[in-house]
C-alpha cells in the first residue's frame, strides 16, 4: 500500500488550457497517460505511473488562467490562507469545496507563481489524502 502524502506535498496537478483534448493527446502519446472524462464537466482526470494524479480542464472565468496549478496538501485551508498573506503571498480565491472530497483555495507566491492549497475531507474515502482536487462547479 502506498504511503499517504504528508502535509506540504503536491497531491494534484491541473492543466488549465484552451484545448484540453489537444493536451490529453500530447501527454497520452508521449508518456502513455490515460485520461478519464468527468461527466458533466469540461474536465478529465489522469494518473501517471508515479507522482501526484491530476486533471485537464478548459479555461474558466476569473482566476483560471492558462497554465499548470499544483495543489499542496495542508491541514487547514483557512490557516494557510492566513499564513500566505503574512508571508507576502496573495490569496486568489476564497476557500471552495469539492463536494464530498475536500476544500481548496488558489494563491500566488511573492514571485507570481499560482498554486493551490488542498485540505482533504477526512470523511472522504476513509480519510485518504491523495484524492483529486477537481471542482464540480468549474
Image: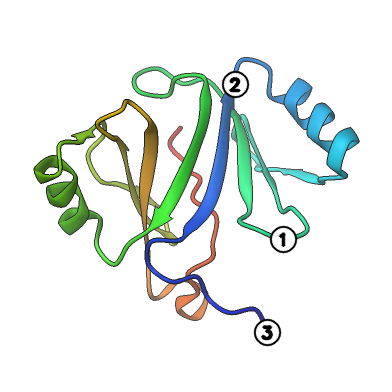
Residue closer to the observer: 135 or 63? 63
Disc 3/disc 2 C-alpha distance (Å): 33 Å
Disc 1/disc 3 C-alpha distance (Å): 13 Å
Res. 84 image quadrant: top left
The residue depicted at 74 percent of the width and 26 percent of the height is: 23
Query: Helix or strand or loop: what does disc 1 sit on?
Result: loop
First-in-chain label (3 vs 2): 3
First-in-chain label (2 vs 1): 2
Query: Helix or strand or loop: what does disc 3 sit on?
Result: loop
The single residue placed furthest to the left in the displayed view is 86
Number of other residues with Cα within 10 Å of mark 1, as a class: few under 14, some 14 to 19, many 20 or more = few
Position in image of residue 18 (x %, y %): 61, 15
**Residue position for label 1:** 50
The residue depicted at 35 percent of the width and 23 percent of the height is: 63
Residue closer to the observer: 34 or 109? 109
Position in image of residue 37 (x %, y %): 71, 41
Q: Is residue 88 left or right of residue 44?
A: left
Q: Quadrant of the N terminus?
A: bottom right
Query: Helix or strand or loop: what does disc 2 sit on?
Result: strand
Position in image of residue 101 (x %, y %): 44, 61
The residue depicted at 61 percent of the width and 29 percent of the height is: 42
Number of other residues with Cα within 10 Å of mark 2, as a class: few under 14, some 14 to 19, many 20 or more = some
Relative to residue 74, is residue 20 depicted above or below?
above
Residue 17: give its label. Answer: 2
Residue closer to the observer: 126 or 52? 52
Residue 1: give its label. Answer: 3
Res. 102 image quadrant: bottom left
Disc 2/disc 1 C-alpha distance (Å): 23 Å
Mark 2 vs mark 1, foreground winner is 1
Mark 1 vs mark 3, foreground winner is 1
Position in image of residue 130 (x %, y %): 53, 66
Q: Is residue 84 left or right of residue 18?
A: left
Amino acid at each position: 500500500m502506498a504511503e499517504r502524502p504528508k502535509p506540504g506535498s503536491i497531491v494534484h496537478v491541473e492543466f488549465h488550457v484552451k484545448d484540453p483534448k489537444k493536451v490529453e493527446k500530447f501527454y497520452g502519446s508521449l508518456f502513455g497517460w490515460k485520461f478519464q472524462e468527468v461527466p458533466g464537466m469540461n474536465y478529465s482526470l489522469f494518473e501517471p505511473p508515479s507522482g501526484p494524479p491530476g486533471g485537464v480542464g478548459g479555461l474558466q472565468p476569473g482566476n483560471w488562467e492558462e497554465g499548470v496549478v499544483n495543489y499542496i496538501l495542508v491541514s487547514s485551508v483557512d490557516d494557510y490562507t492566513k499564513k500566505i498573506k503574512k508571508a507576502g503571498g496573495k490569496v486568489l480565491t476564497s476557500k471552495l469545496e469539492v463536494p464530498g472530497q475536500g476544500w481548496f483555495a488558489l494563491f500566488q507566491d511573492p514571485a507570481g507563481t499560482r498554486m493551490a492549497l488542498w485540505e482533504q475531507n477526512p470523511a472522504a474515502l476513509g480519510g485518504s489524502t491523495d484524492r483529486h482536487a477537481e471542482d464540480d462547479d468549474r
